[in-house]
Image: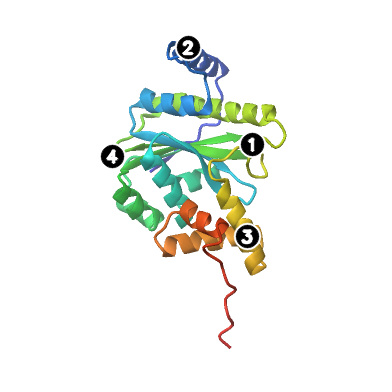
Amino acid sequence: MVTVHDGSRDDSRLAKLWTSLCDLARARRRRVTVEFVCEAVVDRFGVKGAYLVVGTGSGAAELRYATGELGTRLAEIETTVGEGPGSMALRTGLPLLVADLEAPAIGRRWPLFVPLAVEAGARACHVLPLSTGASRAGALTLYRAEPGSLPRAAVGEALSFAELVWVLLLNEQTHAAGGMLVGSGNGFPLLSPQVHQAAGMVAAQLDVSLEDAYARLRARAFAEHRGLTELAADVVARRLRFAPERDPG
């Protein structure tokens, strides 16, 4: 595993990337959106796919977009078990390059995430945080179906892709009409608003904070080998209710 310390910003490189993406989008009769940039970075580095998570007001992270089903699954695994390369990159604000998820040191660092991720079909992850100074908005994770590294020379370009995603997210936030987007306290639109709704319901049922309610949802999803969004849907539909733990005494 390689943690890359690269706090520099190359505006000329960012401008060139923006221009090339605009040309590519025009040729494909599309717009340069968050989704388009995520798909373009997959093509650029020849990886299996990518997924983007954004931070929530409770300190957790939630899926914003995935280029394929495996990305959706990996994001949900990290959210459910509470560990993994994306979670670590969000905490540190540094890029994280994992060339082989089955390396012994990686398994010891993330004992819950690694076996589930490998079983799902991932063998390498390269995480690019979305951050400006101390502000950490999310993380863009590139994943491979076989071991492989992202060359150090390519890290700067990959970070430019992540920075463009960050700019586009801010643009969405700025231009969103009041009440038009459903999201967390930071204003970003999310793909799974039912998780937030379920957390609010569980908080009321158990008389706990939203952070504690979110942790309870995640723990139950992991214990029952279910997806977090699936469990949240049951809570919202009132097919599942959380009851306070009884005092054994």
**Residue type at mark 1?**
Leu
Camera-side mark, 4 or 1: 1
| Residue annotated with mark 1 | 181
Question: In which quadrant will I find the N terminus?
Answer: top left
| Residue annotated with mark 3 | 201
* Residue drawn at point x = 35 percent, y = 53 percent: 116
How far separated are the C-alphas under marks 4 and 1?
Answer: 38 Å
Question: In which quadrant will I find the C terminus?
Answer: bottom right
Q: What element carries label 2?
A: helix
- Using the image as rendered, state which of residue 29 and residue 14 is in the foreground: 29
Q: What element carries label 1?
A: loop
Q: What element carries label 3?
A: helix
Task: Tell me which colouring the rendered structure shows.
Answer: rainbow
Up/down of 200 relative to 7, above or below? below
| Residue annotated with mark 4 | 147
How far separated are the C-alphas under marks 3 and 2?
Answer: 44 Å
How far separated are the C-alphas under marks 2 and 1?
Answer: 26 Å
First-in-chain label (4 vs 2): 2
Q: Position of residue 207 (x, y in %)?
A: 67, 68
Numbered circle sitting on residue 42 = none
First-in-chain label (2 vs 1): 2
First-in-chain label (3 vs 1): 1
| Residue annotated with mark 2 | 26
State whether residue 7 appears in this view. yes
Q: Position of residue 21 (x, y in %)?
A: 48, 16
**Residue type at mark 4?**
Pro
Up/down of 3 relative to 7, above or below? below
Instruction: For label 1, count other residues whose C-alpha is less than 10 Å away and answer few (under 14), some (14-19) or many (20+).
Output: some
Q: Is mark 4 on a helix, strand or loop?
A: loop
How far separated are the C-alphas under marks 4 and 2?
Answer: 34 Å
